[in-house]
Amino acid sequence: MLSNIYDTHFFEKDLSELGLTLSKEQIDQFLKYYELLIEWNEKINLTAITAYEDVLKKHFIDSLSLCKAMEVQKELSVIDVGTGAGFPGLALKIAFPNLRMTLLDSLNKRIVFLNQVIEELKLTKIETIHGRAEDFAGKAEYREGFDLCVSRAVANLSTLSEYCLPFVKIGGLFISYKSEKIEEEMKQAKNAISILGGGVKKQVEFTLPSSDIYRNLVVIEKIKNTPKKYPRKAGLPSKEPLC
């Protein structure tokens, strides 16, 4: 087992601070994920963070910090928009294996990597999609079909809301992972969020365990249906954010 090779005490301590306890098998899955990430990162650009302890804290623990904002129920249907190398969606799937997870990314090379990880970790109830949020949010099988949408993508909250809220069913949540204080961004996004059928429920501000790394989870509840014209065609949400 990989957990016999790597020092995981700091990882398990961080997990404990989040109120999480993982089995040896799950910790081994995270370690295998780490190894595949580093291996593939030599071929395609997946992350600038490559040191072992940094990956575990700044990618894995950061992804799992979702539990600070909500109780992660077993059977939630979740979509991770702009998943990149699988953060936070793939990490959440390992920690909460009963989640029904969809990983969406616009770069096929990343999807090929994610499929490799999924296969090697023998994960089930998880799918990957190669494409843009603007295209898939309009498809009947995905539109307003998820209990939860998460995104750690780098974009302003107005743009992210247009990408993400169309996927969320009424009563569900969109949670945006942010790494800075965003008072002005929140003010600018308030009307856009309302237009798209959402309402800000809360912000959860904290530092990652045993660090001074600031994080902010913005929790948006889906209150009403998103008008059919949103999201707008590819490129517009980022070029001309709703205001």
Image (cartoon, rainbow, N blue to C red):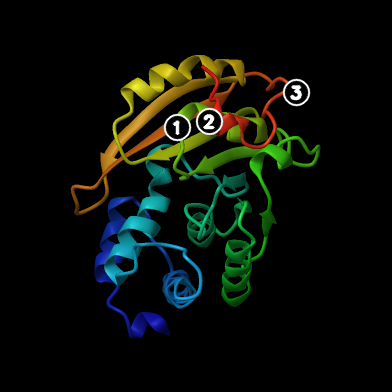
Task: Residue 156: give its label.
Answer: 1
Badge 3 amino acid? Lys
Q: Secondary structure at mark 3?
A: loop
Residue 49 x, y percent position in the rendering: 34, 63
Locate residue 12 relative to residue 217 in the image: left or right: left
Q: Are marks 2 and 3 in contact (CB under 8 Å)?
A: no
Distance of label 2 from label 1 (alpha carbons): 6 Å
Q: Secondary structure at mark 1?
A: loop
Within-10-Å neighbours for mark 2: few <14, some 14–19, many 20+:
many
- Image quarter in which the N terminus is found: bottom left
Residue 61 x, y percent position in the rendering: 36, 56
**Rendered view: 131 above or below 243:** below
Residue at 63% across / 74% down in the picture?
119
Q: Tell me the residue that label 2 is attached to.
A: 159
Within-10-Å neighbours for mark 1: few <14, some 14–19, many 20+:
some
Answer with mark 3 or mark 1, whichever residue precedes in sequence. Answer: 1
**Rendered view: 86 above or below 226:** below
**Rendered view: 198 above or below 143:** above
Q: Secondary structure at mark 2?
A: helix
Locate residue 55 relative to residue 167 in the image: left or right: left
Q: Are marks 3 and 1 in contact (CB under 8 Å)?
A: no
Distance of label 2 from label 3 (alpha carbons): 16 Å
Badge 2 amino acid? Thr
Badge 1 amino acid? Asn
Q: Are marks 2 and 1 in contact (CB under 8 Å)?
A: yes
